[in-house]
Amino acid sequence: MKLTVSGNEKEYADGLSVAQLIELEKVETPQYVTVSVNDEFVESGAFAETSLNAGDIVEFLYFMGGGQYGF
Amino acid sequence: MITIRLKQQDCKSIIAHAKNGLPNEACGLLAGKADGDVKTVEKVYLLSNPDSSPEHFSIDPKEQLAAVKDMRANGFVPLGNFHSHPSTPARLSEEDIRLAYDGKASYLILSLAGESPVLNAFGVVGGEVLPQVVDLLD
């Protein structure tokens, strides 16, 4: 099946889960990555059980945050 | 050393955004072109700080997603982010370093602690802080 991942359309095995896609794409520090599928955010605890379908558009977003104190 | 080329006007926008956000921290994203060690900022995304805090910021994933799509539509790549330090210097805090998960990103800090704003840039790779140069363009 074809998926668009981070703007790139590629062929993947049918029935792929979000967790498997993260592994295939070698996403760095996956524990801090937010995933959206067709503009819907997937709960991080649901990566393994969320299956992807042909035509899905997937984005990986790094958490970005911080704070001014503590030097 | 990586150089961030930033238009004066974009720098002024970041400062205005940070001042408008006081007393809280303000934040946003940077997009543009990357060529070797030179990153040229073409667009600055002035985003909200859902933490609404003078001590913390985070970038709203919905706003982040919209910005990433806009970058792609414009042929830009994500270059990094910025946030303000309302009352501390323009350097990465321990929390900033701990939460800097993207080794390719530039992290710009705007300090409003002194009379004049100070903007500095850093990379963070494996917890190591690597200073970067901010080159302001006319």
Image (cartoon, rainbow, N blue to C red):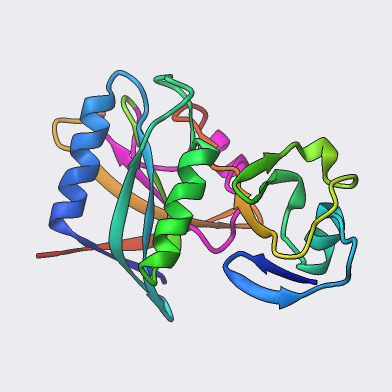
Q: Is residue A55 above or below residue A52?
A: below
In the image, A36: left or right of A13? left
| Residue at the image position 72 percent from the left and 59 percent from the top | A28
| Residue at the image position 28 percent from the left and 25 percent from the top | B21
**Percent x, y for residue A44?**
77, 39
Q: Quadrant of the N terminus of chain A?
A: bottom right
Q: Is residue A26 above or below residue A58?
A: below
Q: Which residues are magenta?
A: B88-112
| Residue sitting nearer the eye, B73 or B32 | B73
**Percent x, y for residue B2?**
40, 70
Which residue sits furthest front? A54
**Percent x, y for residue B110?**
30, 41
Q: Is residue B99 above or below residue B36?
A: above
Q: Quadrant of residue B78?
A: bottom left
| Residue sitting nearer the eye, B107 or B128 | B107
| Residue at the image position 60 percent from the left and 43 percent from the top | A63
Confirm whether the magenta stretch covers residue B111: yes
In the image, B18: left or right of B67? left
Confirm whether the magenta stretch covers residue B18: no
